[in-house]
Amino acid sequence: MKTATRITWLGHATVLIATGKGANILIDPFIEHNPKYPRGFELPAKIDYILLTHGHGDHISDVAPVAAKHGSKVVAIYELAAWVESKGVKETIGMNLGGTVQLGDVAATMVDAKHSSGAADEQGTHYVGVAAGYVLAIPGSPVLYHAGDTAVFGDMALIRELYRPEVAMLPIGGHFTMGPKQAAHAVRLLGATTVLPLHWGTFPPLKGTPQELAALVDRSVKVVEWEPGDSV
């Protein structure tokens, strides 16, 4: 890592990014019912932005209370931003695939993901746009990529060509997302040199492990074998 930017894994796909200039960005807040959330971990008093990759409950269930408590603006694909606003989120930034928004000193670009994205409430399941990932360009920092929930797809090569992500946060658990074999191919398409595995070990079907992924990638790639609560 080339800067003071810190990434803390909070279990499942939830990560907290603290930039060198003091901005806090939380991605996919799944806290109260997340069995892997590090108990006792205290979020910072101010979370400037919350980024949502898609509408499933294990990625957005805590967005409204966290945004209210920590004074956050919520960034999501347009339809999902409108939906969480209807659930009590006061400040949203709706965007779409290929777009970039400036979040303080962080340029956040929404990129494709291959996954479903319905949001469920007591009245059923609702269309809230499509699944996405984010590329985060932070001055003085490696380019970060959070893939959200996704299968491997060939246009990850375009993400490499356009944005050159160095640190890739990738789901590896399998069943609902790609597993280690597919994630290893994603690493090759992306050209990332550091991989932070997400979406594994939370529930029994998510069987993929960082060790399996590490055995399948080039030796020059660092696969971080972290646990919830760890920071890099």
Image (tube, rainbow, N blue to C red):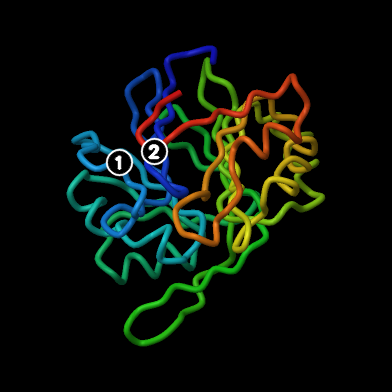
Q: Is residue 77 above or below residue 5?
A: below
Regarding mark 1 in the picture, which secondary structure is present there? loop
Which residue lies most toward the top here? 2
The x, y position of residue 77, in whole percent, is 51, 59
Of residue 8 and residue 184, the one placed in the foreground of this image is 184
Mark 1: which amino acid? Answer: Pro
Residue assigned mark 1: 38
Q: CA distance from mark 1 to mark 2?
A: 6 Å
- Mark 1 or 2 closer to N-term? 1
Name the residue: 48% across, 37% down: 102
Q: Residue 27: image x %, image y %?
A: 42, 45
Q: Position of residue 21 (x, y in %)?
A: 36, 19
Q: Which residue is mark 2?
A: 228
Residue 176: name its quadrant: bottom right
Amino acid type at mark 2:
Pro
The relative height of residue 38 versus residue 23 in the rendered view (above or below) is below
With respect to residue 140, does 13 lie above or below?
A: below
Up the image or down, 74 lies above or below 124; here it is: above
The 10 Å Cα crowd at callout 2, few under 14, some 14 to 19, many 20 or more, is some
Residue 115 falls left or right of residue 25: right
Work out which quarter of the rendered image holds the N terminus and state it: top right
Residue, x 56% and y 42% (percent of image)?
146
Tags 1 and 2 touching, CB below 8 Å: yes
